[in-house]
Image: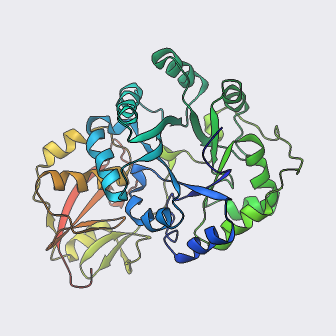
Amino acid sequence: MSIFSKFIFGSYESNNITNRSYHQLLDELPGCINTIDTAISYNNINQLLPIIKHKNLRVISKIAPQMHRVMNQLIDDHFEEAGLNYIDLMLIHNNRCDWVPTVKGLLEYKKVGKLGDVGVSNFSIEDLERYKVVFGEYPAYNEFEINPLYTPLDVINFCKDHDIKIIAYCILGGKYNADNMVKIYTLSYLVSYAASLADHVILRSDNVDHIRSMVLTYNEDLVVDKYKNSAVDDEEKVMVPMKYRPQLRMALNDGIVLYQGNQYCSESVSMSEALSLVNTYEDADIDVTDFLINTAGFEFITDYRVYLRTYLRQQGYKIVGISSDMCYTDDMMYQIYIVDGDNLSKVKTSTGRLLVKQFRRLERV
């Protein structure tokens, strides 16, 4: 029997989950949610600590296999930032490279009592079969997308046949599609659809009232068409990270170049304009060659940001604060950019450049 509740708090790109209204929701709905889902790549574990401790929530996290070269550094940093010495479940975040070495590393953490269990995310039947061949058993959990637009029934049935617990995410079709999906299907249908197929369902929203509505609108007796628009082709997935290309702008905040969406963003400027206007901007005083070797294979801007923090600590820097965008020492702020042409990107591509920059720390930060 699973230790996790049917519904799980999702924290991916969630800006408001630290708001005390989420604490109140847990108080209102005792027993409905006892778990929160995060990942090393989300770079938010330190922000989640208050809500985790408020109700002693269980924690599910993930590590990308592309991070294997520095996985021990990143996992140890994850524990440190969370203020935890134990995580209930750690998943392999994707199957886009050889994940076997990373599973072996996680099993060592489980052996010494740092992890409760090891699972996978976004794994196909072929991946699950390989896991069994290599490790002698199937993983305990598989987390993947389920919604009316993408229902991989082959994977769902395989997991159920082999006692692999299913964790569903993207149940509303992704945050950019959610409003339209709710209009088409209704919220009750979408929640009940995913819940009828999965053991656990991740609920993610920047609005606590939406989370409350998702819990309260769930109807386990609702008859849903499990086969409607079912798909086995990954091209049908709503969330395909390597195709994730939100429109990004550069922004200046007192001489600091930030990504759009950061709470400090102000005016929008192009990359070349921004860098020409920043008088406190300079290359970071680190061994960039060494940094790039250790991050070879990283895919997303957040991957690099997390590693930058651990790298600076390893080099003897005293980190006094972090945000989703930057980390701070006593007198400097450090930021990483992926630049493709004159545009920012959240995804590292073959044409993208990685810039590691530092800025004189401002009084307001």
Please report the residue visible at 79 percent of the width from the left and 58 percent of the height from the top: 218
Quadrant (top left/top right/bottom left/bottom right) for the C terminus? bottom left
Residue 346 is situated, as x and y percent measured from the top left of the image, at 40, 55
| Outermost residue, bottom side | 363
Expressed as whole percent of the image width and height from the top left, the position of residue 343 reads 36, 60
x, y (%) of residue 190? 76, 54
Looking at this view, is 344 or 127 the one in front? Answer: 127
Horizontally, is 18 left or right of 161 in the view? left
* Residue occupying image coordinates x 56% and y 19%: 129
How many numbered dots are placed on residues in this image?
0
User: Looking at the image, is 151 positioned above or below residue 195?
Assistant: above
Q: In the depicted view, which residue is nearer to us: 28 or 347? A: 28
Residue 97 in percent (x, y) is at: 41, 30
Position of residue 287 in the picture relative to residue 258 (left or right): left
Mark yes or no: residue 248 visible.
no
Q: Residue at x 15, y 77 (%)?
A: 279
Left or right, 69 with reference to 229: left
Residue 215, quarter of picture: bottom right
Check the picture and name the quadrant holding the N terminus. Answer: top right
Give the answer, above or below, for where 345 lies relative to 328.
above
